[in-house]
Amino acid sequence: MFSRYVLATALVFAPIAAPGAAEAQKFSTVYQISLFGLPIAKSSFSGQINGTDFIIDGALRSSGIARVFDDTHGTTKVSGYVENASLVPISYLLNYRSGKKNKSTLIGFSGGTVTKTVNTPELKIRKQGWIPVAKDDLTRVGDPLTSTLVKADGLRDVCNRTIRIYDGEMRSDLKLSYAGIKPFSTRGFSGDVVKCNARFIPVSGYRKGSSGTEYLRSKSRMNVTFAPLGATGVFAPVMASIGTKIGTIQIRATRFGTVN
């Protein structure tokens, strides 16, 4: 249960260096993930961009009482290029271990279209009620990391969009709407941030009628808070609240910013 909800949410937060920079820039971020106010996991990310190419490395590990029930840890790596001030992924790789099971997902992209997906072990063939991923679903999509980096003119423009995400099995949309601006501070950052309400919309790659998916679609209260990466026009998440069947998962950046 831990891996199902936490991996799906925690690995979408990975601020990296801003597009358009001529010189290489590096960012480092650490997130604390909690449930019912108790820490259950920690994720960390580091990234670099040299103006034309980017790379992200991340790690996640369960912590606190969650490790008693489900010791989960994983790593992720994304590489790609910068085009029109946007980050375009080429390769996304997730390796993780939950309990005694090792799993991995590799996704290849070309110009925003998925060209290959390799899950190890292979996903189980599901028939009853399963909504398969269609070819058209895999165009104009991003991986769970780069899809949450938003290019906008200002804080009020961040939330007016729908994020299209593919994680190697499910295609989903995250529809954002403006909820307000407020101050926020953590190690490496202090300033105004924008809160977006979020609505989860499953598209394909899931079982129709699944209680977990239906809860996220129709009952879950979600919001994501974005902070600016300097004066670059790129905004990345610093907080999130995601209602699930097992409770509300809270994610907060305990570090957010550039490194030398």
Image: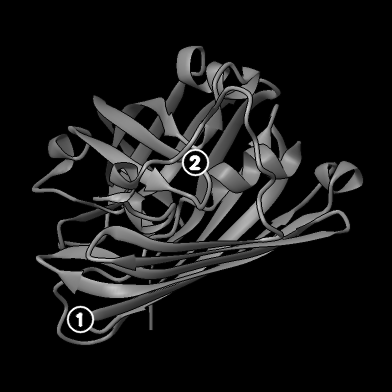
Q: Secondary structure at mark 1?
A: loop
Which quadrant of the figure has residue 42? Answer: bottom right
Q: Quadrant of residue 209?
A: top right
> According to the image, label 2 marks what residue?
170
Residue at figure coordinates x 83%, y 53% from the top left = 71
- Front residue of this view, candidates 257 and 178: 178
User: Left or right: 114 with respect to 117?
Assistant: left
Please provide percent x and percent y for residue 227.
Answer: 30, 48
Going by the image, does 163 lie left or right of 38?
left
Lateral position of residue 219 relative to residue 179, left or right: right
Mark 2: which secondary structure? loop
Q: Amino acid at mark 1?
A: Thr
What label sits on residue 52 in the rendered view?
Answer: 1
Q: Name the residue: 85% across, 42% down.
A: 65
The N terminus appears in which quarter of the rendering?
Answer: top right
Determine the residue positioned at 54% across, 20% down. 208
- Horizontal arrangement in the rendering, residue 73 relative to residue 143 (left or right): right
Q: Does 33 appear above or below 85?
A: above
- Determine whether 125 is above or below 259 in the image: above
> What is the quadrant of the C terminus in the image?
bottom left
Picture quadrant of residue 201: top left
Q: Are marks 2 and 1 in contact (CB under 8 Å)?
A: no
